[in-house]
Image (cartoon, grey):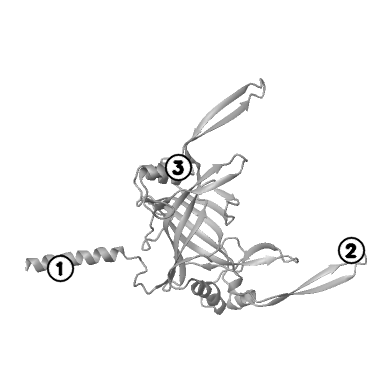
Amino acid sequence: MKKILLTSLLLSFYFITIHSQKPFYHKNKTISWVGETEFEYYLEDYDRLNFEPPTNQQEETRSIKLDPFATCELGTERYFTYFIINEVLENRRKVYSMDGDPMTSDEISNAFGKATIDTLITYDPITYKETVTVTRIEPQYQIKSFKVRQWWFYDKEKESIGSLVQAIAPVLELGKSDGSKIYKPLFWIDMKQSVDKDYDYNSPSVIWAKETLSSLSFKDVKKVKGRTNKTLKNVLYKEPKKGKTQVLHNDSWYSYCADEMEVNEVESMLSASKDTIVTFHPETFAEDVQIIKNPEVKFKDFDYMRVLQHWYFDKSTNSLASKVISIGPLQNIYDDKGKLKYRRAVYYVPSGQ
């Protein structure tokens, strides 16, 4: 009897262990699609900043929350970077090469490289006396961005797209002799986000939070489960067109204050249209009327999506987490010579993550 009970307990433990190792989408019918991507995000820098990073993908980032008392880093925005890098150097994180192989401490140190010496020459404005200052810059303090590996998923129950952080790779910024810079991803730091935990920047365990607004292409998604193109087309094109999902106006850069769109407004945005352009001859002032036909907007026309995301650093688990706020398909707008002028969101689809 004891032997049977022991065997039963061992089998139960084995089943629970194996089951707990299964990914969240395993046999979960509400999760119909999971795709993996790698994007580069600038999660640090100033409180609010418009810029063009090396990938030309991200448009804006801002701080939502920074708790200096929890971080013991009063007045600094780079707590997250320093914390993660120190944990890596102290062997408190699982680290893998960019090819996915486990790395040793020596391999991690070699990936950072040697410290650089920077010479700064200044002159006194009155005496013109020259002062030479030599500074030693450790490589880990040249991390300006992170490449983020994420899982994107569609939850049929919530009828929305969400995201989960799987790993991050610090990107080392190196200067070249010609003044240009190169950006080198060093290694992957394991950082798996739990799908069961709902993050809120008001939570006491969240001591750091960012918001990013990015134009991202989902054409090179690594499929994990389901069909990527079909899912995105249904959620971001077909369902809005049929009035089966909530859609917000594009008249705001952010979707927070945007009003909800009626289905006929969505149909009008996507249907074929005509624009009348009136010009005048510079000498005769003769009027010239041109009719420009705009073809129907189809899903294949959307090369990029504008994704509004929140990022959280959870002190209770020392992990990075992300949450999708909204996604907007971006339409290419061309000039009269067929050159791309800009991209604009046709509308926004809010996420229920």
Which mark, residue 8?
1
Q: Are marks 3 and 1 in contact (CB under 8 Å)?
A: no
**Percent from the top left, x then y, of residue 168?**
44, 53
Q: Toward the viewer: 341 or 147?
A: 147
Q: Is residue 270 shown left or right of residue 204? A: right
In the image, what residue type sits under mark 1?
Answer: Ser
Q: Residues within 10 Å of mark 2 (few under 14, many from 20)?
A: few
Residue annotated with mark 3: 112
Image quadrant holding the N terminus, namely bottom left
Identity of the residue drawn at 55% across and 58% down:
213
What whole-number distance in Å separates the C-alpha atoms at marks 1 and 2?
A: 92 Å
**Percent from the top left, x then y, of residue 104?**
35, 46
Specify which label sits upstream in the sequence, 3 or 2: 3
Q: Is residue 149 visible?
A: yes
Mark 3 or 1: in front is: 3
Q: Is residue 170 above or below residue 309?
A: above
Q: Toward the viewer: 259 or 191?
A: 191
In the image, what residue type sits under mark 2?
Answer: Pro
